[in-house]
Amino acid sequence: MVSPSVKHHCGLFGVYGHPDAVHLTYLGLYAQQHRGQESAGICSRNDGPICRRAGMGLVTEVFNRRILEELRNPIAIGHVRYSTTGSCHDVNTQPLVVNYSRGQVAVAHNGNLINARLLRNEYEEHGAIFNTTSDTEVIVHLLAKPGHLDKDNDVPHVLSHLQGAYALLLLFGDRMIAARDPFGLRPLVLGRVAGGAIVVASETCALDIVDAEFVREVLPGEVVTITDGGLRSQWIVPEGTYRPAYCIFEQVYFANPASDVFGENVHRVRRAMGAQLAREAPVEADAVIPIPNCARCAALGYAQVSGIPYERGFTTSHYVGRSFIMPEQGQRDMVVKMKLSVIKDSVKDRRLIVVEDSVVRGTTTRGKIGALRKAGAKEIHLRVASPPIRHPCYFGIDFPTPEELIASRRSVEEIRNYLEVDSLHYLSLDGMLSCVKHPDRHYCTACFSGKYPMEVNHPVSKLGLERYQLKMFE
Ligand code: SF4
């Protein structure tokens, strides 16, 4: 399980042209609750002004039947959020709605804009007023800029000013837009429900919950405009300008195993990672135990290749939220304790292979290992189904600072000592990449390899809008 110190990012869902668009959006957000649990919001429209409801909390806490009925319209976009840029506040809930000279627009964003601070500085120097501390708000200022309004390709032109990671849904008076940054760092897919209405989602698991058929991915650098007349594609940069850099951490940890992300089923990829780990780091033992929930697929793969029985070593409470999104450390620790209980009978006097998806700070993993020891485990061999995380992410995954990443300051042997396990092995970088088989897919592995798809300058964070300043490769 990823440390509570890793914060997630966001999930998007939109529907164009369905009488129950708002209810479908509610379901689509619910299916993607794992992507963000701090706030949820829906905007909808027909011919009149945009209706909006957003608030702090889970989808089921923010919305009820009455609110959904009030929002009822045939076009809707929704957002679940964990703040990666901008503080955890009501004011930063999304979708953002603003009025500008061409009417209204609602914006929902997944990712992190690395030049947001610079753009905001520029606008503020010219007197612009910002209502939020979120990086997303610069998009609406760019949209409202007079020079951009005149352009036929206003949205692609505006998005060409952004650097970093973004999957976006925009709702205008006459169209809905789905867009993805030229590297395709965050996932975004198109689907269709019976009757022909178009659905857009971060993950395919959200299409499944509304019985939508998968149509295709929104491609890296593509802007898809959805109107009553159908779909139209435009490009932020000429096709082929950038080599895609899909976030491998979506496959390792973030996405729902039921989803197909970047063209591959997440469960299959994770199981392959566990199988590869078994080939790279075999050890004799009595049982393979996953640290739930994300390591289950990898543990299954490890067990299948090693021939060692897969066992449940923990039970999980379904009534406690995902621990890492809790903002206070004390709350997180308590939630972790409440969530997982050791099944002593699976553990006592046994040699265990414990499979983790990733280790960030190491504190949570150490706690779990301690619980297994306390329950009487004879040997514990920790196998991590991804390489050591040594570098920060600038693209929307809020890892702790490099100093707090356990693998950035300790050797594998030092980590083994700290975690108090009998042996420790991480999946190799090549081993991990061998599990994502799509021939024309390219992944960002920067948090593991330090090789960013963009040039990285040094950390700058005066406004707290972003932690780092990056310069894109031309
Ligand atoms: S640095 Fe890591 S978490 Fe961030 S986009 Fe790249 S692979 Fe994903």
Image (cartoon, rainbow, N blue to C red):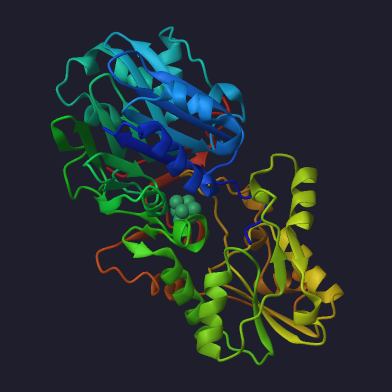
Q: How many marks?
A: 0
Evaluate whether residue 160 shows in this view: no
**Rendered image quadrant of residue 69:** top left
- State whether residue 189 is above or below residue 87: below
Quarter of the image for the N terminus: give it.
bottom right
Q: Specify whether 310 is left or right of 253.
A: right
Q: Position of residue 395 (x, y in %)?
A: 46, 44
- State whether residue 65 is above or below residue 403: above
Quarter of the image for the C terminus: give it.
top left
Query: Which of the two residues, 361 or 408, is positioned nearer the viewer here?
Result: 361
Residue at 59% across, 64% down? 358
Query: Which of the two residues, 131 or 172, is positioned nearer the viewer here?
Result: 172
Q: Specify whether 222 is left or right of 405.
A: left
- State whether residue 296 is above or below residue 69: below
Q: Position of residue 456 (x, y in %)?
A: 44, 45
Residue at 43% across, 43% down? 28
Q: Position of residue 469 (x, y in %)?
A: 47, 36
**Rendered image quadrant of residue 463:** top right
Residue at 23% across, 37% down? 223
Q: Specify whether 221 is left or right of 97.
A: left
Q: Position of residue 178 (x, y in %)?
A: 29, 37
